[in-house]
Amino acid sequence: MMDCISGQLLIYRVQQYPNMEKNKVFEWMSELAEQLELYHKWKNDQPYRYLNPYSILVTKDENIVLLDMEAQSNEFVLRNMQKQAMRSHFVKPIVHMKENTKQTLDLYAYGKIIQFLLANINIHPALTKGEEYHLSKIVEKCLGENPKRQYDELSQMKKELPVIKDRNTSVRKKRVLIMMSFVCLAAACVVTAVRMKEAESRTDNIREQLEVQVGENQKLEESNRQLSEENQRLSGENKDLQEENQMFREANDSLQEEAASLRGEIQNLQETNQLLQQEDQTIIEKEQDNPAE
């Protein structure tokens, strides 16, 4: 609950390192419950209210602490809580608040945090059927899905959290279980797990390929649209050029007609001038034949 502790927000920690040991996940659940309990004592039983993956810090020592919402450096958590997706998932619906205590607000968000962890973390070794059922019941009571079977106090939930097993004891129990198991059943489980992993990998690859293909199709559609617009523009310019050429041809025909007319007039003037020259020559000859007395 201090804003001066360095670490990584839970949402980014889970995204970056999704593989975790079972005991560490159980430790986080227990530490988060203890952090909420300390906050309630510190704030005279007031709820934390802003419990979500952005308000939980994972320290360098892999411990869980809550951010101080009164610190200005943590205002981004409040802004994230205003988003509809965050409020709809981590804030208890108002319709259920009248009949619940203040602690149930944080219990509801705590149940959502457990769901968030189980959905985004690969737990090793995997949870047993009994552990999955046990955690689902804790989440159900935190969310208050059944009003007759829900937590009213944080202490009720803490008592039912999974017990963190000693690593050596756990290893010995696993060895005994493996020795008692049928070889064929173990092999079948391994093969099934490998095939499921391969199927998930193929699905991820296909999804990535589809996303790339969709992106390329969008680029091609955009290129086709731009080419279509360019063709329309060029078609318009070509039409204008054709109209201008038609005007030039008509003007050229008109000029040729005028030139032909001028040539005819020049020829007429030349013929007239030739006749005049001939008449002048005739007059000159007559004057030479009949000189004046």
Image (tube, rainbow, N blue to C red):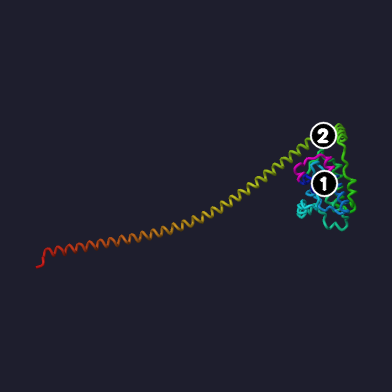
Determine the residue positioned at 83% across, 32% down. 183
Within-10-Å neighbours for mark 1: few <14, some 14–19, many 20+: many
Depth check: give the residue in front, 269 or 54.
54
What secondary structure prevails in the magenta region?
A: helix
Q: Residue at point 56% right, 54% down?
A: 229
Asked if residue 71 lies in the magenta stretch, the reply is no
Q: In which quarter of the image is the C terminus?
A: bottom left
Q: What element carries label 2?
A: helix
Residue type, numbered disc 1: Val
Dot 2, crowdedness within 10 Å: few (<14), some or many (≥20)? few
Task: For marks 2 and 1, give the one nearer the viewer.
Answer: 1
Q: Measured from the top left, where is residue 225 in percent x and y?
A: 59, 52
- Name the quadrant containing residue 291: bottom left
Q: Distance between the residues labelled 2 and 1?
A: 40 Å
**Mark 1 secondary-structure assignment:** strand
The residue at the point 28 percent across, 60 percent down is: 267
The picture quadrant where one finds residue 171 is: top right
Query: Where residue 287 appears, x then y in whole percent?
Result: 13, 65
Instruction: Identify residue for label 1.
Output: 65
Query: In terms of sequence position, does the residue under pointer 2 or pointer 1 come before the other?
Result: 1
Q: Residue furthest front?
A: 4
Q: Name the residue under label 2.
A: 186
130 w.r.t. 180: above or below: below
Describe residue 3's horizontal placement relative to residue 221 as left or right.
right
Q: Give how far across and how far down residue 96 sits, in percent.
A: 85, 56
Q: Which amino acid does label 2 sit on?
A: Ala
Q: Is residue 206 left or right of residue 232?
A: right
Where in the figure is residue 261, as x and y percent of width and height? 32, 61
Magenta region: 12-28
In magenta segment, residue 23: yes
- Eyeballing the image, is 278 above or below 229? below
